[in-house]
Image: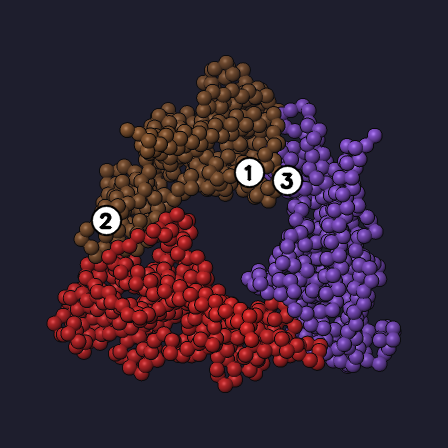
Chain colours: A brown, B purple, C red
Amino acid sequence: MQPAAATFAAPDWPQDAWYAAAYDVEVGNRKLLARTVADKRLVLYRRTDGTAVALENACWHRLLPLDKGHIEGDELVCGYHGLAFDGAGRCTFMPSQDTVNPAAKVRSYPVLERHRFVWVWTGDPAAADLDRVPDLHWNDDQAWAGDGRLIEVPCSYKLVVDNLMDLTHETFVHGSSIGHRAVAEAPFEVTHGPGMVTVTRWMIDVEPPPFWAQQLQWKTGKPPGNVDRWQIIRFEAPCTIAIDVGVAPTGTGAPEGDRSQGVNGYVLNTISPSSDKHCLYFWAFVRNYALQDQRITTLIREGVSGVFAEDEDILEAQQRAIDEHPDKVFYNLNIDGGAMWARRLIDQMIAAEGLASHLEAGRQADAAFATVVGA
Amino acid sequence: MQPAAATFAAPDWPQDAWYAAAYDVEVGNRKLLARTVADKRLVLYRRTDGTAVALENACWHRLLPLDKGHIEGDELVCGYHGLAFDGAGRCTFMPSQDTVNPAAKVRSYPVLERHRFVWVWTGDPAAADLDRVPDLHWNDDQAWAGDGRLIEVPCSYKLVVDNLMDLTHETFVHGSSIGHRAVAEAPFEVTHGPGMVTVTRWMIDVEPPPFWAQQLQWKTGKPPGNVDRWQIIRFEAPCTIAIDVGVAPTGTGAPEGDRSQGVNGYVLNTISPSSDKHCLYFWAFVRNYALQDQRITTLIREGVSGVFAEDEDILEAQQRAIDEHPDKVFYNLNIDGGAMWARRLIDQMIAAEGLASHLEAGRQADAAFATVVGA
Amino acid sequence: MQPAAATFAAPDWPQDAWYAAAYDVEVGNRKLLARTVADKRLVLYRRTDGTAVALENACWHRLLPLDKGHIEGDELVCGYHGLAFDGAGRCTFMPSQDTVNPAAKVRSYPVLERHRFVWVWTGDPAAADLDRVPDLHWNDDQAWAGDGRLIEVPCSYKLVVDNLMDLTHETFVHGSSIGHRAVAEAPFEVTHGPGMVTVTRWMIDVEPPPFWAQQLQWKTGKPPGNVDRWQIIRFEAPCTIAIDVGVAPTGTGAPEGDRSQGVNGYVLNTISPSSDKHCLYFWAFVRNYALQDQRITTLIREGVSGVFAEDEDILEAQQRAIDEHPDKVFYNLNIDGGAMWARRLIDQMIAAEGLASHLEAGRQADAAFATVVGA
């Protein structure tokens, strides 16, 4: 059994991954945005054609954070001595001199926008694979409507993954909104495949908690009776979790596949590590009814914000406790089956990268040897 | 001569001791109380029968501080996943499963209430000895009345012991209330026995400082003339100090034992280390006149609070200076006789525990050897 | 190429130097002033004859910072137990005892006042050389008038030196007050001698920036046309920089030496290291016209304060970036010629002290050897 604290030795995440760095609306061509993702300090902005740029946030010259500067056209101008960098990180202007040192550049990161997020690839740029962007398509699908937020939480991103992979905690942390005894009592099933874990829980013929009772009433216009409630958690390694949630009046066939009488939502989450003890927790809640009703969007977003603030409080306290008890381990209950699989997949990704580095180093050593002894 | 900073290497207190963790009124059966005593993070509450409980403040499962949870009957329920623990620290409920892992428990500490404080034994539970609770009986003796407070001071508890063992500092730190030149000028006597040090100082025929002039006037109804003033400091290792203080009009026989014309109080202090640089300083001031007069109790408590705030300021600054000057030592003056003996007794307790551990380890090694070579 | 962070290994300044510890008006005989200069924690005050004293800020007895005490005549009385120290650091009073331990003293530092600053020598007192006080004579010269401030900046003093040795940054950091494109475009010349570096930049026939246009208008009473502008930066190792600045209407002969139609000022700067990442930045701005006009003095002081606040923001951010990127180096542009020479002179002073210590240690070893083997 490994000390809990040791499970957070740096870096505790895969490098070769797309991490959400910002909501799309946070990145513009007027204001520079500083973000730390996977221990990389980044500055984000948009070119005049709208494409997003992510550069290392330290000037080549004297390290001033580039977010202290400003944007001129497609370029970023440092706020200290005016060095300019293009979106690829190449320096294009140096003050008081006619020529620019061609070696002058800052690191540029592969970046793309998808599903309302700006994603950054923090590993080997050659390995940046568009197919590996996590699936949060509900977030800009016409059949779904909703909104979300970014929370910065002073804890390991893995604690947030644990939190989302077991919703039993709703009963104890969120008793006034979405939790009730049924969540802790209902059985659940864990399945897993390559890079994916699914936890499925159905609560049959239960009283709907306030959050869901309200939504059923919005949809049907009358107070609901008992419901069948579902939570289908889909984890995509290393840190994206889409949760299919909803309720339908008991007896209307939801468990068998007919959700037409119920209300359905997706809780979309992607949690980018900033450091070993800090993460960027992006979430959204989308629904598939009353799509045009901005009032419902706002009410749900504020309601979910309140629920997640309860989680923040728990997650911060948990991280502090881990730091204060370096000798203690995490023990597992039955409910931790999903989180255990999620962590196993994360660990496999990290280990595979270590192995890849090892093999690459060996290959280079062989090549060097071949050069020395070779033809 | 040892660097001052080195005198604070952790842990710098005996483990086998009763430390005050809270005033009795701070611990209840509605609200969980978190406290750190001798580097142990504790959560305190009362069972329905009123007895106090002290548990390790980290859930067995995922380390969440248990003070984030709530009390149900005699048990504490974790605020994350609902695990329940009884007063002995045994887990009695796990969510979503029928059986409870019998190994699931958190550490429980021996606890008792005496003299209006809740005391916790931080060492070997088998050694917890009721006779070793420090004597602060004046705090709930019918012949005395008064009140006190807890101050959390960011300094080693030993600096508070030093402070209280030499009251010369009253002249310089508390000049407007209890200090005057006489304290720094009067001779004093230090005596010591097993686990105890006494410092006695009499100031004969001196003008009473404001704090005492006021009390004499409350008792006698007229402005006082010169007084004989006494301070008899009784240190009980490792960190409890009861100070017999008072004044009586000069010539009425106080030095010979007749204090009937004067006013007498006890300053009761017990200072529990939290960490090497933080302590819980519990104090009370009790008097043996006008016992029913709550107005006097309040006025004295507020007055002493003001005096102790002056000490806090000094103690914090002193700890910072120690940290900033790791190469510097403490030098001793004549006035430090009491504090030097107090520290010597503390050091002996710590050393004896080290020796006991050493002997125990030796005994176990012998036993193991006997097993290996034995019959 | 050396990592940027490594250039800040402690101590990163010469010891044998006069460092400004305070403005003269900050040191009095009523109030003790605590300051940290070159990692020395000091307490400053004045004797009754007005001479300034700088003592180590920790009592010999129990390390309490002496600035918690008070001044009695020429002596400083500790705020805890009343030990008194004279201006040479000798203890002259101990409470409750008739004799004073003659070994009791705190370190006293050579101190002098010049050019409105109180200077402290932090190295070997025997080497304290009055001729090495940096030249900031304009600050109390009758031909000049002005005022200044102290800013405490959380960065290495070397970053402030860099900042002042290249004023190209005015274009980018101070665009609304003193910066314009001309500063970044005009050529400049760097010269250096023993312990001195000079950077000279003339901008001919340029539009005056607001700060200077205003001053010309104050002097001449009418809106100015184009000007010749000069910046002559004089660095005196290790950390004093006097900058001769001004503008004169183009064609009135300023480049040839006739500044009579223009306005001239000196920006006086001396930056004392407190620690590797903190410095005391003393500055003043003096002018040689309208000497009696306190309104102009105040307006300029407030204006320059605003300009320097922009620098503070940059300098703090730069230090943080250095700390966050321990693997990164500083690269140099043409504009860094002055700063490079300044740093070279600082490094030479530090290296020379290391060499001197080395030679002295060798000399003592030789002497010891001579004693052992000698007559």
The residue lying furthest to the bottom in this view is C49
The amino acid at mark 2 is Asn
Chain label for disc 3: B
Q: Quadrant of the C terminus of chain C?
A: bottom right
Q: Amino acid at mark 1?
A: Ala
Based on the displayed image, in which of its 4 quarters is residue B296 positioned?
bottom right
Q: Circle 2 sits on which residue?
A: A101
Which numbered marker is on residue B58?
Answer: 3
Can residue A372 be seen? yes
Residue drawn at 33 percent across, 28 percent down? A130
Q: Earlier in the sequence, mark 1 or mark 2?
A: 1
Q: Residue at x 35, y 41 (%)?
A: A26
Residues C237 and A8: in front is: C237
Q: Nearer the viewer, mark 1 or mark 2?
A: 2
Q: Is residue B221 left or right of residue C15?
A: right
Give the side of residue B282 with respect to residue A80, left or right. right
Residue drawn 77% across and 66% down? B233
Residues at discs 1 and 3 both on one chain: no
Q: Does residue A114 appear anywhere in the picture?
A: no
Q: Is residue C327 above or below residue C83?
A: above
Mark in front: 2 vs 3: 2
Q: Amino acid at mark 3?
A: Ala
Q: Label 1: which residue?
A: A6
Chain ID, mark 2: A
Q: Are marks 1 and 2 on the same chain?
A: yes
SS of the residue at dot 2?
Answer: loop
* Residue C190: image location, x then y, percent: 24, 65
Q: Secondary structure at mark 1?
A: helix
What is the spatial separation of the Cα atoms under label 1 and label 3, in whole angstroms?
A: 17 Å
Callout 1 touching callout 2 (CB < 8 Å) = no
Residue B44: image location, x then y, percent: 70, 45
